Image (spheres, rainbow, N blue to C red):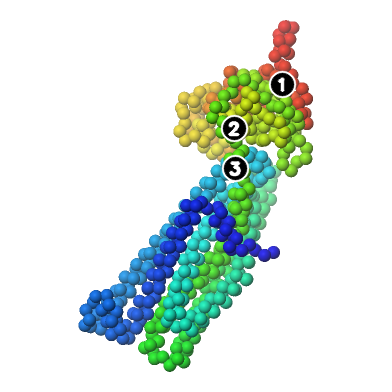
């Protein structure tokens, strides 16, 4: 299988850059051109200096051209020429250093801005997009591939551009000095170039693919190891997971070792060629019957050329290899960026107001790559201020129904509207919802930060109101650091009931009009569930509440109960009438 071309990878990078970032590449190119011209000037004055060391009178001619006295002593001539060479060399290296800083700072700025842009696209993607993916892929793309695209790809291209311009300019100087020598150098460079293009670069692309695969697999193993550590210990599977990580890590390290060792080979070959060319040049000049004095200037220029160009040529080959190895990452970043759906998933409805009811009309939904509908022909209304319970066996469609109500999933058929006109797939609808999931996600941060979730400035009044309403006050007051206590990764230092109360407090912190509990008590024991249900019944006052549960007893205080079976509504029971009949009977 042939590897993608460098030009196609560069086209993909160009597509991912903004107009302003493309203009910055013009600045990088101009910087490279300036450095190259200074390299030519430096090489020229070194040739002159080599001649002046043997024939100071030549230096007198050059110094007179820039305003020096026409009767300088030979020692003074050599001194002044040496000072001029030093100044030019210093200026050249200062400009070269500025070029390197400009290149790296410019490209690294593009790097973090692009990763921010990519993460925004992920953030705005449809929720269904994440249901078909492994989370380690997104981590690998943002944290690994995007980084490699810039550090291994764009920086390599910028450096290759700079070195190539320098190479062309210096070879141009050699052409002026000695065309035959320039042809020889071009011939050797062409052989090295063909060797790199035909043999080395495709191999580095294949290594890049294998490195990418090994890096993602080892990252996935690490996530699984740390997330499932408790179960791994209890099931005695430590070695299984460690060995799985070790396998992919060893594979990645082996490829890295081969790449690094192979990168060192061109330098050795180039050094041998340089010495060979140096001897050939001396032989060539001797055969042309040039005197040692005449040869000194040319050899001085050649030595500088070798000193500057040969390491640069080696660097270009290594950078080409690095770029080729980065192409799999460039392709994956390009594919991710162009396939992630953004913006259109959610709409902005500034005048959104919830006054009447939530209406589901003939809703059908099917997950990607699944033939059977998860929901089929669902129709019912939820009035504002009503408490609705949804019950059913696992797989009956309860959680899917909630995700549709939340506007996270778009039904293939039917509509969900608020007050008959506002879509649930809107930012304003999300702002009116407090959502309590079955599996609570807590960050490794303080209790108050988890309640205010994502807010830099925490509102103390709303925080305390939410803590009191979720009946967390007694628990928090017993802690030495109160609400500033760290909960550990995923809340590992808290009990299930405490985590759920923090989740309820998080939902209440926003003072929502609608509360949705997605099997929030299913993982709790009976006593903890009973206490949590007291909390839920206390906070549901003056709010629209939707509750999912496995057991009917959990929903005994709801106004109506919707029973789900096989993605359809089996029946809707009016609990108010049942309660009224029971009270009348008593």
Badges 1 and 2: C-beta atoms under 8 Å apart?
A: no
Relative to 174, 392 lies left or right: right
- Give the residue at mark 1: 561
Query: In what element is the residue under mark 1?
Result: strand
Q: Residues within 10 Å of mark 1 (few under 14, many from 20)?
A: many
Q: CA distance from mark 1 to mark 3?
A: 36 Å
State which tag comes first along the sequence, 1 or 3.
3
Instruction: Report the quarter where the N terminus lies.
Output: bottom right
Residue 35 in the image: x percent, y percent?
41, 67
State which tag comes first along the sequence, 2 or 3.
3
Residue 218 in the image: x percent, y percent?
63, 53
- Give the residue at mark 3: 342
Vertical comparison of 191 with 569: above or below: below
Vertical comparison of 559 with 251: above or below: above
Q: Quick one: 583 or 566, which is closer to the camera?
A: 566
Q: Residues within 10 Å of mark 3 (few under 14, many from 20)?
A: some
Q: Quick one: 103 or 144, which is closer to the camera?
A: 103
State which tag comes first along the sequence, 1 or 2.
2
Going 47% across and 35% down the picture, which residue do you hit? 456
Residue 78 visible in image = no
Q: Quick one: 417 or 326, which is closer to the camera?
A: 417
Q: Quick one: 534 or 184, which is closer to the camera?
A: 184
Going 35% across and 71% down the picture, which residue do you hit? 89
Instruction: Report the quarter where the C terminus lies.
Output: top right
Going 64% across and 39% down the picture, which residue do you hit? 127
Vertical comparison of 299 with 550: above or below: below
Residue 408 in the image: x percent, y percent?
64, 35
Q: Which mark is residue 104?
A: none
Residue 380 visible in image = yes
Q: Residues within 10 Å of mark 2 (few under 14, many from 20)?
A: some
- Give the residue at mark 2: 426
């Amino acid at each position: 299988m042939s590897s993608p071309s460098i030009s196609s990878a560069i086209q993909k990078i160009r597509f991912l850059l903004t107009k302003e970032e493309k203009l910055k590449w013009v600045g990088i190119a101009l910087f490279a051109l300036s450095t190259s011209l200074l390299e030519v000037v430096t090489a020229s004055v070194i040739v002159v200096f080599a001649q002046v060391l043997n024939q100071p009178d030549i230096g007198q001619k050059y110094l007179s051209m820039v305003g020096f006295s026409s009767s300088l002593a030979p020692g003074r001539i050599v001194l002044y020429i040496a000072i001029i060479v030093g100044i030019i060399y210093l200026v050249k290296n200062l400009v070269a250093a500025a070029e390197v800083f400009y290149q790296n700072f410019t490209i690294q700025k593009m790097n973090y801005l692009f990763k921010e842009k990519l993460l925004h696209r992920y953030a705005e993607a449809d929720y269904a997009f994440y249901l078909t993916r492994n989370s380690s892929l997104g981590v690998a793309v943002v944290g690994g591939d995007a980084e490699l695209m810039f550090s291994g790809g764009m920086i390599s291209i910028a450096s290759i551009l700079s070195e190539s311009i320098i190479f062309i300019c210096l070879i141009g100087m050699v052409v002026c000095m000695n065309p035959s020598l320039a042809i020889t150098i071009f011939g050797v460079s062409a052989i090295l170039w063909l060797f790199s293009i035909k043999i080395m670069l495709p191999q580095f692309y294949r290594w890049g693919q294998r490195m990418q695969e090994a890096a993602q697999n080892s990252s996935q193993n690490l996530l699984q190891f740390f997330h499932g550590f408790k179960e791994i210990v209890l099931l005695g599977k430590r070695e299984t997971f460690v060995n799985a990580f070790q396998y992919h890590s060893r594979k990645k390290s082996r490829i890295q070792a081969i790449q690094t060792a192979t990168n060192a080979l061109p330098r050795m070959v180039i050094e041998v060629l340089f010495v060979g060319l140096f001897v050939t040049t001396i032989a060539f000049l001797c055969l042309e019957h040039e005197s040692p004095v005449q040869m000194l200037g040319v050899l001085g220029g050649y030595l500088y050329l070798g000193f500057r160009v040969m390491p640069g040529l080696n660097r270009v080959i290594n950078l080409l290899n690095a770029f080729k190895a980065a192409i799999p990452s460039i392709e994956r970043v390009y594919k991710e960026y162009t396939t992630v759906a953004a913006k259109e998933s959610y709409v902005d409805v500034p005048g959104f107001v919830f006054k009447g009811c939530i209406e589901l009309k003939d809703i059908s939904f099917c997950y990607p790559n699944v033939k059977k509908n998860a929901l089929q022909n669902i129709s019912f209304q939820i009035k504002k201020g009503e408490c609705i319970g949804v019950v059913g066996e696992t797989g009956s469609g309860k959680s899917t129904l909630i995700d549709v109500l939340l506007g996270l999933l778009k039904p293939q058929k039917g509509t969900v509207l608020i007050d008959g006109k506002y879509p649930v797939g809107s930012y304003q609808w999300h702002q009116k919802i407090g959502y309590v999931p079955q599996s609570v996600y807590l960050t490794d941060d303080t209790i108050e930060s988890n309640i205010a979730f994502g807010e830099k400035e925490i509102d103390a009044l709303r925080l305390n109101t939410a803590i009191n309403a979720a009946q967390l006050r007694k628990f928090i007051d017993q802690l030495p650091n109160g609400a500033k206590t760290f909960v550990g990764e995923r809340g590992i230092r808290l009990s299930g009931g405490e985590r759920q109360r923090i989740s309820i407090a998080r939902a209440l912190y926003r003072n929502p009009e609608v509360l949705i509990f997605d099997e929030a008590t299913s993982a709790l024991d009976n006593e903890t569930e009973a206490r949590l249900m007291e909390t839920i019944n206390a906070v549901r006052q003056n709010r629209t509440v939707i509750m999912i549960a496995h057991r009917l007893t959990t929903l005994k205080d709801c106004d109506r109960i919707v029973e789900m079976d096989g993605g359809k509504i089996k029946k809707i029971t009016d609990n108010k009438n049942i309660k009224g009949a029971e009270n009348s009977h008593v």
